[in-house]
Image: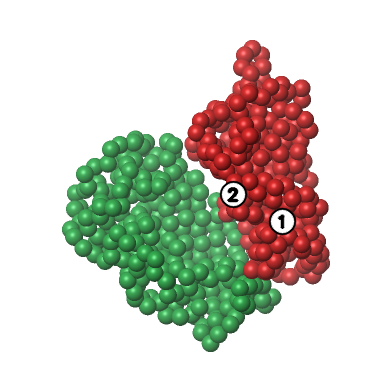
Chain colours: A red, B green
Amino acid sequence: MTADRFAIAARDELWAHGVLLESRLEHGTAVLSDDVIEATDAYDPDLAAACDEEMARLRAAVASVEDARIRAVARAASDGERSATLTITMRGVSIVTTPAAAARDTAMLRALVGREAEEELCETLPIVWRNGSAAVLLHEAFGHPAEHGIPLTPALSPRGGERVLEERVRGGPTWLRVEDISPRGTADLLAGHRPHALRRASFRDVPLHRMTALVARQVDAPFDAPERHVEVHLVAGGTYDPLTDVVTIDVSIANLGGARLAPFTITTTRDRIAFLGASGEPVRYPGVVCSREGQELVVGSFAPVMITGAM
Amino acid sequence: MIYRKRGRVVRHENGVLLRIAEAGEAVERGVAFECRPLRESITLPEVDVPDLIETARQIRELPAIERVIISDGIAEHEYGDARWTDETRRVHVAIAAHGTRAVLDFATFDVAKVARVAEVLARGVREAAPPERIRVAPHVTAALLPSLIGMIEIDQAAEGVDGNGQPIEAVQVTNGMQWPNWYRPSYRIRPLPMPFHLRARPFGIIDDAAPEAIALVGTRRVLLEDGSVVAIRLDRVHAVGKPDGWYPYGAGSFGAELML
């Protein structure tokens, strides 16, 4: 019999316009032996101290932000995790960021939400995913299927010849790499490889193979954006249903031409996603808190500017 | 006032068994809600697991089972001078086949109802036009009751105490009313006003010959006993049967047969 011990301390605070609304502390230990987990709310002073340090960084990073709703989550765990995450919401639009990037991301969010929607999206158009937002699409279209061990559905662009054969095996265009990077190793999500890390939201949860940081890269990708296209800057969320193979993306900030669009939802099956091109280095997308089996975890998200066909 | 909860729960989650013991407290100071573990040992008796494990085993052997979460727990609560204890059993099952997913929730270790849905789904489903009358099974009605407030007469049944230890009084539930009781599913969650133990008042005649809806498979979509998937409308309820079982939707709903 082998035993595996996991301990964690976490603090979670919710602030609205400078006022503390909610404050939660939790700590506990889980000991896994075969298929049984014994979990108690045991206290580990070192983890609690590390967690308090992270929370102090979080509070300092947003001390001057009074025009937002802010959720600050600090975690310290026995597997080495030290995390400090801020979810900042203005006018119903959220980003997820770190203390180091909070000032820059908050300024970006303030600028994006400062403009009212001018148009509804009334047609399906090609999409240019800016600001790293393609990482959310890739998270849903390739990351979750890989977590579930679901066979790949090829997304093909451009179509034809040997490239198609390779894409059928890999589940994506040849110029695209999508990997999950964690301390346990790197998994090729386009090849359907399951993320290596076993992650859990708390000591009372079952650890699952979950993404840690999705990083998409392009190598010599084409980049020829159609003249009429939607530009996506921020998404509110996404889902993947393994039963129907349907990907849903809720877009919160997007433009069409010079006009700001009202929020809209993309619903498509994976085989209808056409990756048309990409440009540049991966950009950190500010915001993926991923929920699966009731467990919310932050997943790092990085992608270049990407173009997809109409969905 | 401070709310404190001490509890043990055993949860079977997709093949893994968790035994959890914890205690915590929550307090509201003005607009702020705070909670933390109590850092004390739990003296409650251990939860018996054989029933739970056997229920999980039987459900996992059924066809098309996508997710199984079964729990059994005991908890002591205190809020000011009020003290109370409760025991809870929960079964959450998702059954998925042929592009259709049924989600079932029970407060008893009831395998028979799960088995019936699993067998119908596994045989195959087809979209169909809704029949003239549908007899909705009690466990399906329980999930629909919150959506039926204002359409049929629904009461909050007087039973037990709420999350602040106050008695849950009988009251007719109407849209827009101020819920008199507070729901506290965990010490880590800020209590919310919510209707408890929803119960539809019986009326009309249940037609036992009408096709039975045995599971919800989407928004306003049900699975019938013959494998048909049909849309339903909630604005034409022709009859409600007698209360038949309590189900863990929100702060609780009683099932009853329903004629649509």
Residue A74 at x, y percent in the picture:
74, 60
Binning the other alpha carbons within 10 Å of mark 1 as few (below 14), some (14 to 19) or many (20 upward) gives many
Looking at numbered disc 1 in the image, what kind of residue is underneath it? Leu
Residue with the mark numbered 1: A86
Q: Residue B199's spot in the image, x, y percent?
A: 32, 66
Looking at the image, is B232 positioned above or below residue A143? Answer: below
Q: Amino acid at mark 2?
A: Arg
In this view, the residue in front, A307 or B156, is A307
Task: Answer with the quarter of the image where residue A192 lies.
Answer: top right
Residue B41, percent from left and from top: 66, 76
| Callout 1: chain | A
| Relative side of B211 to A306, left or right | left
Task: State whether residue A288 appears in this view.
Answer: no
| Residue sitting at x 50%, y 52% | B68
In the image: residue A254, left or right of residue A64:
left
Q: Quickly name the residue at label 2.
A: A292
Query: Circle 2 — which element?
Result: strand
